[in-house]
Image (cartoon, helix red, strand yellow):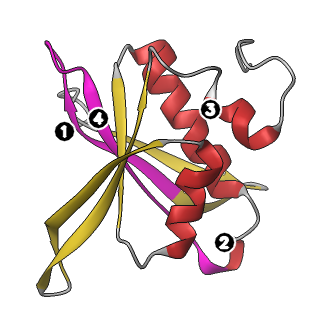
Amino acid sequence: RRARQGKAMPFAVTWKGEMVGQVTVNGIAWASARWGSIGYWISRRHAGHGITPVAVALVADHLLDTVGLHRVEISVRPENSASLRVVEKLGLDEVGLAREYLHIDGAWRDHRIFQALADDRPGRLLARVTGADDAREPVT
């Protein structure tokens, strides 16, 4: 329902024909904000193989280049080293620490907030994780 309303976008992450994870954009705001929040997960069996940074980069590039969002945000719990590695590979700017940001597992949890802006990306995010030569060429 939220996707039909333009407030969310779910994407399946597949590897060799198998669904191995998901990237979801939530909280999409239009009007003067034009931003969304990206969340993601991948199966344990496929973690650590570079799939997640590519999937998140593809979605973020789509949001910033095609959909027309101005800002995408990723929130990561400080102890989640795997997710922190994803945002590091993407080269996202850290906005700061949001104390008691989300209620998870029965308690309010802190999150580090990262962002990418359409205006200040030196190139496509996908190029950052794949090492593509021309960061401005669209991916087909």
Q: Please state the horizontal and vertical placement of residue 76, each as a whole percent of the image.
A: 37, 63
- Residue occupying the point 23% across, 26% down: 6
Q: Amino acid at mark 4?
A: Gly
Q: Which mark, residue 2? A: 1
Q: Is residue 8 left or right of residue 89?
A: left
- Name the N-terminal-most of marks 1 and 3: 1
Tell me the residue that label 2 is attached to. 47
* Residue lying farthest to the right in this orientation: 133
User: Which region shows up in magenta?
Assistant: 22-44
- Name the N-terminal-most of marks 1 and 4: 1
Q: Please state the horizontal and vertical placement of residue 39, each as a whole percent of the image.
A: 38, 54
Quadrant position of residue 112 = bottom left
| Residue 122 vertical placement versus 101 (above, below) | above
Q: Which mark, residue 36? A: 4
Q: Which mark, residue 125? A: 3
- Name the N-terminal-most of marks 4 and 2: 4
Q: CA distance from mark 1 to mark 3?
A: 26 Å
Q: Amino acid at mark 3?
A: Leu
Which structural element holds mark 3? helix
- Residue occupying the point 62% across, 56% down: 52
- Residue occupying the point 58% across, 57% down: 86
Q: Please state the horizontal and vertical placement of residue 129, each as a whole percent of the image.
A: 73, 43
Residue 31 painted magenta:
yes
Q: Amino acid at mark 1?
A: Arg
Q: CA distance from mark 4 to mark 2?
A: 24 Å
Q: Please state the horizontal and vertical placement of residue 90, each as a whole percent of the image.
A: 60, 44
